[in-house]
């Protein structure tokens, strides 16, 4: 997709029926405004995130009701910085957190 001759988005084309190709990054701004939508967002459900993200979200949900907004902000960090670096930091944070949540 181009806007004023500038490429602003790229989506692979699906040639199969009933196949959705969704990029979670494209939904993060909306999810930040409506964080409870994360629970039902298909883009999140089919996202290929490292397991630590799901573990961290589960641990956060045991502690707070504002979890989704905080979690979306963490996901947005993956678009602003090297995703592998964010993954590594989250892994370091989530490991001690999981020790306290059982």
Image (tube, rainbow, N blue to C red):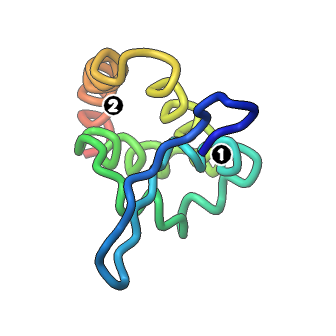
Q: Position of residue 43 (x, y in %)?
A: 47, 59
Residue located at (44% from left, 27% from top): 78
Q: Is residue 45 visible to us here? A: yes
Camera-side residue of 43 and 38: 43
Q: Nearer the viewer, mark 2 or mark 1?
A: 1
Between 54 and 63, the one nearer to me in the picture: 54
Crowd tier of the residue under label 2, counting other residues whose Cα lies within 10 Å: few below 14, some 14–19, many 20 or above: some
Tag shown at residue 97: 2
Mark 1 neighbour density, 10 Å: few (under 14) some (14–19) many (20 or more): few
Q: Is residue 71 left or right of residue 59?
A: right
Alpha carbon distance from label 2 to label 1: 17 Å
Mark sitting on residue 30: none
Q: Residue furthest bottom?
A: 17
Does dot 2 land on a helix, a strand or a loop?
A: helix
- Position of 48 with respect to 39 (left or right) is left
**Is residue 62 something one can see in this rendering?**
no
Q: Quadrant of residue 19?
A: bottom left
Q: Quadrant of the N terminus?
A: top right
Q: Which residue: 40% across, 70% down?
A: 20
Badge 1 is on which residue? 66
10 up-or-down from 80: above or below = below
Of 10 and 72, which appears nearest the observer? 10
User: Which is more N-terminal, label 1 or label 2?
Assistant: 1
Give the x, y percent position of residue 28. 60, 43
Q: Are marks 2 and 1 in contact (CB under 8 Å)?
A: no
Q: Position of residue 3 (x, y in %)?
A: 72, 37
> Residue at image x 31%, y 15%?
85
């Amino acid at each position: 997709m181009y806007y004023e001759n500038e490429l602003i988005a790229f989506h692979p084309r699906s040639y199969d029926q009933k196949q959705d190709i969704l990029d979670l990054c494209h939904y993060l701004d909306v999810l930040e405004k409506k964080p409870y939508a994360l629970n039902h967002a298909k883009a999140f459900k089919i996202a290929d995130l490292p397991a630590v993200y799901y573990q961290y979200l589960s641990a956060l949900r045991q502690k707070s009701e504002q979890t989704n907004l905080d979690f979306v902000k963490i996901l947005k960090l993956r678009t602003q910085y090297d995703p592998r670096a964010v993954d590594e930091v989250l892994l370091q944070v989530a490991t001690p957190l999981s020790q306290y949540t059982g």
